[in-house]
Structures are given as C-alpha cells and as structure tokens.
Amino acid sequence: MPAKTRKRKMFISVLPGEQIELVLSLDGMIQEYYVEMLNQSKTKGNIYKARIHNIDQALQAAFINYGAARNGFLQVDEIHPEYYKSDIKPIKGNKYPPLQRVLKPGQELLVQVVKEPTGTKGAFLTTYLSFPGRYFVLTPGREQLGISRKIEDEKERLRLKTIVDELKLDEGLGVIVRTVSEGRNKTCLSRDLQFLKRLWKEVRKKGMGEKAPGLIYEEKDLAFRAIRDYLTEDVSEVWVDHEQTAQQVQEFAALVFPRRKKMVKIHNEPERNLLERFSLEKQITQIFSREVDLPSGGQLVFDQAEALMAVDINSGKIGGEKDFKEMAFKTNLEAAQKIPHQLMLRDVGGQVVIDFIEMKDKKHINEVEKALKAALKTDKARTDMNKMSRFGLVEMVRQRLGTSALSVTMRGCPGCSGTGMIRNMEWQSLQSLKEIYRLLRRKNCPSPLEYQVDQELAFYLLNHKRDNLCKMEEKFANKVTINPRVK
C-alpha cells in the first residue's frame, strides 16, 4: 500500500503506573478512543476457575462465584455441554435442557469475562473460552473455522481456509481468522497459531490444579492490546509518549511490518502533551459531553437512562432555512451521519432510541434511514436497527465491545443521583426550616441551636428566611446559628 494513502494514525499516551490512553484517528478525526486506569481492575478477557453459587430456574441462568465482589451471570446458552452432569434432552420446543437438571451448585468450571460488571450488575460470563492472537482467535470447545467478513475477496478467503486446514488443528479446537491475516504467508500464520495452542494448554493445565475461585489467565494491558488488535496495514504512524512502551511497540511492529522501520515515533516535547500536539484533546472532551454540535447549527443530546441511551436531535437556529421541511431533513441527515460515530466513541451498548425531528416526506425519511445504515457499517460492533416510526423514533441495539471511556472515568453525581436535576434553594430552605422547627420543639434542645448546611443554602437561609428564623427564636426563646458546611 503506497505511503500516501495511509492516513490512519495511532496514539498511545502512557502515565507510568497509572493510565494508558489509545486513540485511532483518520485524517485528524478520532475514530476510536480507549482509556485504562491501572488502579481499576479490568477483568474483561480474564479466565477464572469458578464455582456455581446457585441456579435460577426462572432465568435459566447460573450465578457464579469467580472471586469478585459480586457473582457473575452465566446464561444457559453460554454453558458448554461438557459441563453437563447428566445427559438430559431439551424439553420439546426448547434448545437447551433445564439448567437445574444438568448443573448443580458447587460445581466447578472455567469461565471468561465477556462484559465487565456495571452498576449493580455482575459480570457477564461464558464457558466458551477464546484466546485472541495477532492473526487468529483460538476457540477451544468449538470446532469451527470462521473468517472475518471484512475479508471480502473470495480467492483470499479460500487461500486462508486452505492454510488453516493444512495447519491441522487439534481435536476440539476452532479458530476465527482475523482481518489482519489477509495477505499473510503460512509461516507467519502458523507461528501465531502455535503460540495460541501453547497458551491454551497452559491455561488448561493451570485450571486443573488451581483452587476455585481463582484467576487462571489475565488479559494484557491496553498498550499491548493496541499493537495486537489495532496495528493494521493502513496505520501509517504510531506515536508513543513513553520510551519503554515505544520500544515494545517498535519490536512488535518490526515483526509485523519489517520494511516500515520508521513507523513508530516518540513524542518527547515537554511543552505540550501528545494529544495536544495533534489537536485531539478537544475531540476527546466532546466524548464526555452531553451535547454534540452539528455542522449546520443543530445539536445532538445524549441522555443515559437505566436500560437505554436516548439521543435527541435539536434543530437549533439554522440561518437562511425558511422551509421547515428542508431544515428538518438537513439536520436529521447530519445527525444520522454523526450518531454512529458518537456511539462508537462512547462505546454505547444495549438499547438506543434516536428521536429525529419529525418528517412527513417519505423520500426524506428513506434518505435519513439510508444515511444511518451506511454510517453504522463502519462500526465494528454488531448493530440491529428498526425503521423510523411515524413519530420520528428509530430504535436500535448495539453490542458493547469493551469498557467505555465514560464508565471508566465518570461517576454518578452525588447531588442529583444521576437525574441531572436538583431541588431548588427555596424548596431546600423550607425543608431546613421544618427541621429547625422540629429541633426547637424538643425539650432537650441545646441553646443556642447550631444548624449546619451547605454554604449556598446557608446564605439563602440568612438572606431570604431571616424573618422566619427570628420568629422561631422568639417563639422558643432560643438562638439559632446557621453554620456553612466546609467541603
């Protein structure tokens, strides 16, 4: 591939012992962003020897003790039949046998974390283990041969299938051929597969000897996964701001791309950080923003509810657009092109509801749906989208690929408990007056009565409710002192 056509760049920013950030950009625009804080234990991809805590017959799922604070969740379709304790056929009309008859509490098994625990939910687990390498994903227990859909050339697909057949997988093993395998020779592919097979043997051996619950295999950190999973042929440059990490990336890149010796570059300018240097910080800030601006003046508003992400489209003030129909169509079209990109950056998973500006013209509706589908094709995650309803709503489901930067770096607001709203000062002051009145009525009320509240509320009480406070002091012959709480 000629150098001039390579416009993708990778940036790895490391704060030693604390944080790793990964940015993939195309023509200066961020395509993907990941962050890992090393003090937060990351478990996705880890393999544990675990024990069944209990089985829920209604859910047909097992709750698994794998050593975490909360038990993991294991659905019936994620349990390999090799763990079944008895040979019981599924009930007519069901795909799987009743879980309570084939598994039992206390039973030990190997599980892998598919989704990190979030909020009050435990981790989502599977017994179908997978080991990602550079060119393959090894799948013990599934004798399959899958080839990435992004490899579209039929001759190349057939060549890769032939190579895998010649490599002769062991019984009970399967592989998925990754996109980066395209064009690679047999020797290169064989080396990667042999490494994964050795890794599986080590995990299996350790799993037999380890006590449950216990960690059997730990997934690599973000810096390693960056070069394993994201360093592809179309990445022209890799910038790293940490010398030791840069050396590791250079060594790996030399094996994969031996002719591109100057691919990895070190950022060592103390005047500005790596992301500032390439004008990426503003784009990263927008990922964490509730509102995202559209080119013509409209706006996207993202609101995360308990079970879904709601995306609202505001038209804003678009100068020169007198025709509302055209304005709505233009704004919706821009939104349709922008929303999938934001969903990718935020790694939004689960239900997504998009509230487009209402349109009557069927041609406009079809164009917006078409634009949304086209933009979703660039997403690595699986998505499923419904047609637009007559109210302008589009429902879709998106697979969450990893731990989003938002969930890693943000916490719920203690003031509003996630609602985005707090009680106004008038209401808060009235509740304080009620409490002061109750305290003054007590027989053993201290004199003076010291009442402590946040600074803003303290000033409001003293400035707007002083008369009420004076009346209470007179009625109960006591002094009330309002003390601002020091944060």
Image (cartoon, rainbow, N blue to C red):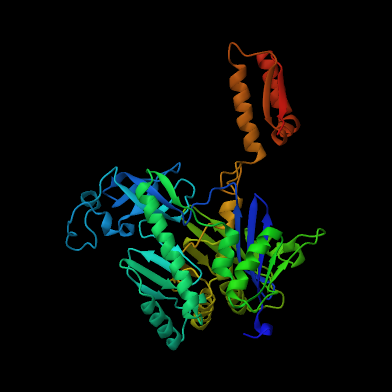
Farthest residue toward the bottom?
155
Camera-side residue: 464 or 145?
A: 145
Quadrant (top left/top right/bottom left/bottom right) for the C terminus: top right
Quadrant (top left/top right/bottom left/bottom right) for the N terminus: bottom right
Q: Give residue 279's position: percent from left, percent from top.
A: 74, 67
Camera-side residue: 190 or 326?
A: 190
Q: Give residue 476's position: percent from left, percent from top.
A: 65, 14
Q: Residue at x 54, y 78 (%)?
A: 371
Camera-side residue: 483 or 97?
A: 97
Residue 289 appearing in the image: no
Relative side of 350 to 35, left or right: left
Camera-side residue: 158 or 271?
A: 158
Relative side of 294 to 70, left or right: right
Q: Give residue 381's position: percent from left, percent from top.
A: 48, 68
The picture quadrant where one finds residue 26 is bottom right
Q: Residue at x 59, y 66 (%)?
A: 227
Residue 67 appearing in the image: yes
Number of on-image labels: 0
Q: Residue at x 17, y 56 (%)?
A: 88
Farthest residue toward the right?
271
The picture quadrant where one finds residue 233 is bottom right
Farthest residue toward the top?
443
Q: Give residue 23's position: percent from left, percent from top.
A: 64, 65
Q: Residue at x 34, y 71 (%)?
A: 144
